[in-house]
Amino acid sequence: MMDKFFSGKLLFVGLLFAGLALYPLVASSYGLDLVSKIMIYAILAMSLELLVGSTGLVCFGQAAFFGIGAYIAVMLSPESESGHLLWLLPAAILAAAVYALFVGALSLRTKGVYFIMVTLAFAQMAYYVVHDTKLGGGTDGIYLYFKPTLGSILDLNHPQVLYFFTWVFLVWTFIFLAILLGSHFGRVLAGIRINEQRMRASGFSTYPYKLAAFVTSGGIAGLAGFLFAVKDGFVNPEMMSWHLSGALLIMIILGGLGHLRGAIIGAFAFVFLQEFFKSSDIFGAFAKHWQLGLGFTIIACVAVLPKGLVGLPEVLRKRLYGGRPSSDAQIVLK
Amino acid sequence: MAETLLRGSDITQRWGGLVAVNAVSIELERGSVHAVIGTNGAGKSTLINILSGEFPPTEGKIELLGQEATHWSQAKRARQGLGRSYQRNTIFPDFTVFENCRLAAQAQVQRPWVWWNNAQKCKHSVTAANHALELAGLMSVKERFAGLLSHGQKRQLEIAMCLAIQPKVLLLDEPLAGMGAEETDRMLELLASLKRDHAILLVEHDMDAVFRIADRITVMVNGSVIASDTPDQIRVNADVQTAYLGGH
């Protein structure tokens, strides 16, 4: 039974990744750009899922790590030639991880709503640094004139190459986090999420574990930021705003908290819904009020699907055939 | 002479003007169950929280296995051999019974940097978890989700999780709370079987059970110890009868 459930999940994820790999064969340039963007958001959403769904830390400042990764990618790139991918990418990840270490070291001393507020405050600090100073070009942002290269092996100016480059990191992030969550480290995070007091009583010093999760999450968000900067060739302070942090939380809730694949599904669902409600072909003049439609749809989704979109098959199965709810909390590979 | 595994000397805990625990000294010996009884608010749970390291005492000293442990964190005390259970269940309801114990056992062999190894394949924690489940009599339900156990089994699991860390000292906070007669008997059998290799501190309201299992009883009233003796002596102690049993 468990194996069947387990393989069903793997099959879904495998098909999703295969579908994404084949998508460029039929995609328009707009579609390619849109799905590249969604894959980057999916990486970012998985980084937040590591904190919220897997560790129980509701971080409201994930956009800061994303933005730092993006800004570092642009700021460290030479203005007159391409920078080298092999040092720009690690630099972006490292910078985001270092900021996450600083934020995490302080914010993890608080709990609950205070933790949410402190992470938000740190993210807003980072936002105003790039917004109100010339460090990152102010409100205008800065351009990446030459995309990073890997010698002659990788030309990220080509949209399809960039797409597959992003796809590789999406798959890598999923596999890395899935393995991580099944390891000693991941199981301790799961224990902390459910009952931190019991974990301490068992002999785990929980603070270093939470801090390590926070830094890992920040580093992955930095990776997403790097990819975003390379894709758009432009960064601006809005990448660090609390709107994005909020949207990310909605993505993982919409997809289904506690599931890595939920983060990916949530990112796709969120952006598709956003594009749908923004479409003036469908909604005419009302399209400018797209947030209203998006908001109502998300509220309806959460009300009907308390486990998020990953719970949809179970809800449908129960509606159609009745039967017992399943508990999938034991499954490690999500 | 029995070996003293945990010693608390002159432990005092003040919360502002309130003295929750007042200069309490207690010794836990291997092969012995030491019960602490008292009315609600007597300071029993505060004492157990201090001994387990949830927070440091305002005054006093704690020695664990002969080492000064007053300022050790709770996690360090647990790793050194101090297991505790709580009044309320602190099990992981969405994990299997086995995984509850395996995760607790993992604390003894923490290798968080080995991120590529599946925790379920950790030999030490699997062996320790199976041993703990065997001791607690939960092998038959090891694959069941912990949230689906009966109340009595959940309390047994709580103790099994303590055993999984291979402790030498057990601090049990009301392990019999909410149990029926049969479940209580089973739990007392379990405690009796654990007594040989452990020093056990038992905080409990069920007086019949306490007098059946305890080798020594400490009676607390308003944060202070009014008597500490064998069950037979406690039964006839006039101060205890007056203060705790209402003189009956």
Image (cartoon, coloured by chain):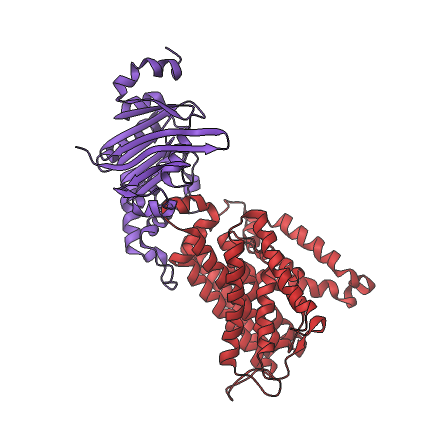
| Left or right: B4 as drawn, with respect to A98 | left
Q: Position of residue A103 (x, y in %)?
A: 54, 59
Residue B243: give x, y in percent of width and height: 39, 16
Q: Nearer the viewer, residue A198 or A98?
A: A98
Q: Is residue A6 visible?
A: yes
Residue furthest toward the left?
Answer: B1
Q: Residue at x 37, y 47 (%)?
A: B75
Residue A238, by quadrant, is: bottom right
Q: Is residue B73 above or below residue A121?
A: above
- Could you tell whether A326 is left or right of A82 in the image? left
Residue at 60% in and 64% down: A64
Res. B137 in view? no
The structure residue drawn at horizontal position 59% and vertical position 82%, both measured from the top left corner, is A147
Look at chain B in the picture and name its colour: purple
Chain in red?
A
Task: Give the residue furthest to the right.
Answer: A285
In this view, the residue in front, A87 or A179, is A87
The image shows residue B218, relative to residue A42, as above or below, that is above
Q: Nearer the viewer, residue B106 or B82?
A: B82
Q: Quadrant location of residue B160?
A: top left
B226 sits left or right of A129 in the view: left
